[in-house]
């Protein structure tokens, strides 16, 4: 069976095509648009411009799927549309205009899908899983391959950047403001107060971009999936102090994270606060996450 999955996130709207055989799935194609939905919130209300952007991308994806006779399509949205005040109205309009049904998944469900998708590809029977998205951050602690703690925090790379930054790249004062907000929200996860984890399983765009940037800066093989958390503050200091980059710094970012330049510092601030809170020394990046977890949980079951 060929299955199309569309993930409407706060940073990106992604479409992934999978071949599914019994309980095995293989990714065969992936497309994405950097829509930045979180930037279209006005007093936590999704604007019409944001709705139009989503519809435009979904219509393009639908045309692609029709050409290749892919009829099995499921779409879901996370913090991008579930947290806005007009969530129900917006989702209904998008469904009516595009004909694509959209499931709004809760923060708890997103954390569960993250866990199911990511842990199939890494050899960690216990630890902390972190997904830093554009509009939310999911934390999942698990032991013996079972979830013991989970939470979805209302903080993400794009939302934090929008709240704190006056220009494309942050300056030193704006970075300090990001740190203050991130500490307050992450410290509020009271169920996690006694948890420590030397290793984090990191998923999502922030960790994907961080891995690419880390490998380039510290001369690692581009396939390396392990990130030393001690370097987070060093990277933030290098690229997030003046609000303006040198040409050499610009080249590094453009070559390695062209789609994530504007949110990499805010995402790294969240990652750094989490790493320090939980005593983490290393992040292992997993390329599987919420979409794969959604398939295993809702389609393969």
Image: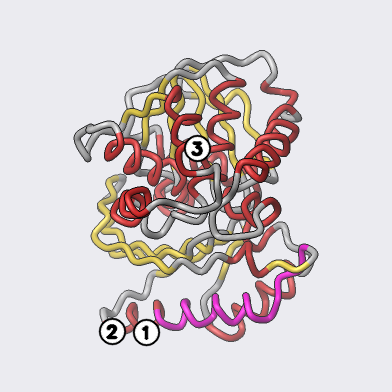
**Residue at position x 34%, y 57% in the image:** 254
10 Å crowding of disc 3: few (<14), some (14-19), many (20+): many
The residue wearing badge 2 is 67
Q: CA distance from mark 1 to mark 2?
A: 6 Å
Instruction: Tell me where residue 276 sits by quadrant.
Output: top right
Q: Is residue 167 above or below residue 241?
A: below
| Label pair 2/3, CB-CB below 8 angstroms | no
| Label pair 1/2, CB-CB below 8 angstroms | yes
Magenta residues, as a range? 44-60
Q: Is residue 72 magenta?
A: no
Between 298 and 120, the one lying in front of the other is: 120
The residue wearing badge 1 is 63
Q: Nearer the viewer, mark 3 or mark 1?
A: 3
Q: Chief secondary structure of the magenta span?
A: helix
Earlier in the chain: of badge 3 and badge 1, it is 1
- Where disc 2 sits, the SS reads helix
Between 289 and 56, the one lying in front of the other is: 56
10 Å crowding of disc 2: few (<14), some (14-19), many (20+): few
| Label pair 3/1, CB-CB below 8 angstroms | no
Between 276 and 140, the one lying in front of the other is: 276
> How many tags in the picture?
3
The residue wearing badge 3 is 236
Q: Is residue 54 magenta?
A: yes
In the shown orientation, is residue 116 left or right of residue 45?
Answer: left
Q: CA distance from mark 3 to mark 1?
A: 41 Å
Which numbered dot is residue 205? none
Q: CA distance from mark 2 to mark 3?
A: 44 Å
**Residue at position x 36%, y 58% in the image:** 258
- Residue 51 percent across, percent down from the top left: 62, 77
């Amino acid at each position: 069976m060929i299955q199309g999955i569309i993930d409407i996130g706060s940073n990106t709207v992604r479409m992934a095509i999978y071949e599914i055989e019994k309980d095995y799935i293989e990714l065969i194609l992936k497309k994405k648009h950097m829509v930045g939905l979180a930037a279209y919130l006005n007093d936590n209300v999704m604007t019409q411009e944001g709705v139009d952007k989503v519809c435009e991308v979904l219509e393009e994806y639908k045309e692609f799927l029709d050409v290749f006779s892919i009829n099995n399509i499921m779409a879901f949205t996370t913090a991008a549309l579930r947290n806005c005040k007009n969530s129900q109205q917006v989702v209904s309009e998008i469904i009516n205009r595009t004909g694509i049904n959209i499931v709004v998944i809760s923060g708890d469900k997103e954390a569960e899908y993250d866990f199911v998708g990511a842990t199939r590809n890494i050899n960690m029977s216990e630890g902390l899983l972190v997904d830093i998205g554009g509009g939310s951050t999911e934390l999942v602690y698990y032991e013996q391959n079972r979830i013991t703690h989970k939470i979805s925090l209302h903080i993400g790379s794009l939302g934090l950047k929008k709240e704190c930054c006056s220009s494309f790249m942050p300056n030193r004062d704006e970075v300090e403001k990001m740190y203050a907000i991130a500490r307050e929200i992450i410290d509020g996860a009271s169920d996690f107060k006694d948890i420590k984890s030397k290793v984090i399983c990191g998923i999502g765009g922030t960790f994907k971009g961080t891995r690419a940037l880390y490998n380039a800066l510290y001369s690692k093989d581009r396939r390396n999936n392990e990130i030393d958390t001690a370097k987070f503050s060093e990277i933030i200091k290098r690229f997030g102090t003046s609000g303006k980059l040198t040409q050499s710094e610009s080249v590094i970012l453009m070559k390695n994270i062209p789609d994530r330049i504007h949110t990499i510092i805010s995402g790294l601030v969240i990652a750094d606060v989490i790493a320090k809170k939980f005593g983490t020394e290393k992040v292992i990046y997993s390329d599987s996450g919420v979409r794969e977890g959604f398939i295993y949980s809702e389609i393969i079951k």
